[in-house]
Amino acid sequence: MEHLTLETFKEKIMNFETNKDWKFEGKLPAIVDFYASWCGPCKTIAPILEDLSKEYDGKINIYKVDTEDQQELASMFGIQSIPAVLFIPMNGEPQMSLGALPKSRFKEAIEDVLMN
């Protein structure tokens, strides 16, 4: 799992400086976890995302964005509560999920949103 900065976000997810409309830059579907180190529910889903990154290795990318460190990214996506998880398919619009999801719900979203 890779932690994204503003610069790596523009390379791997979306370059919002050159694109006004959504244009995914990734080569695989992705999940972006917007979190903070002090957030209890964020700590709950961290090992789930770690497991999923191994289980779906080579099929999806999982990234993390520290909302304390990357405030510009958090505000760009209107993140007001965390954890906020962005599911990004190769084609189509990304979908945001708020709150700590159980592993089964993450797997459902991966299959329904990312693998279609």
Image (cartoon, rainbow, N blue to C red):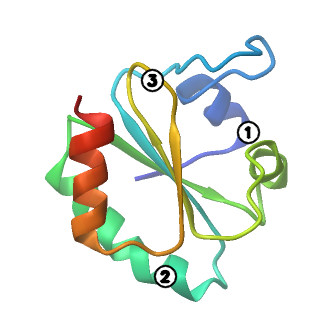
The answer for how far apart the CA atoms under marks 2 and 1 are is: 22 Å
| x and y percentages locating residue 109 in the rendered image | 31, 50
Element type where label 2 sits in the image: helix
Looking at the image, which residue is at 62% across and 34% down?
Answer: 8
Q: Nearer the viewer, residue 9 or 44?
A: 44
Which amino acid is tagged 1?
Answer: Leu
| x and y percentages locating residue 19 in the rendered image | 73, 13
Mark 2–mark 1 CB contact (< 8 Å): no
Neighbourhood count class around disc 3 (C-alpha, 10 Å): few under 14, some 14–19, many 20 upward: some
Q: In the figure, is residue 32 to the left or right of 60?
A: right
Which amino acid is tagged 2?
Answer: Lys
| x and y percentages locating residue 10 in the rendered image | 66, 27
Is the residue 60 above or below the residue 2 in the image? above
The answer for how far apart the CA atoms under marks 1 and 3 are is: 15 Å
Is the residue 17 above or below the residue 82 in the image? above
The residue at which mark 1 appears reads as: 6
Is the residue 80 above or below the residue 40 in the image? above
Element type where label 1 sits in the image: helix
Say the numbered circle drawn on residue 26: 3
Q: How many numbered circles does the render carry?
A: 3
Mark 1–mark 3 CB contact (< 8 Å): no
Say the numbered circle drawn on residue 43: 2
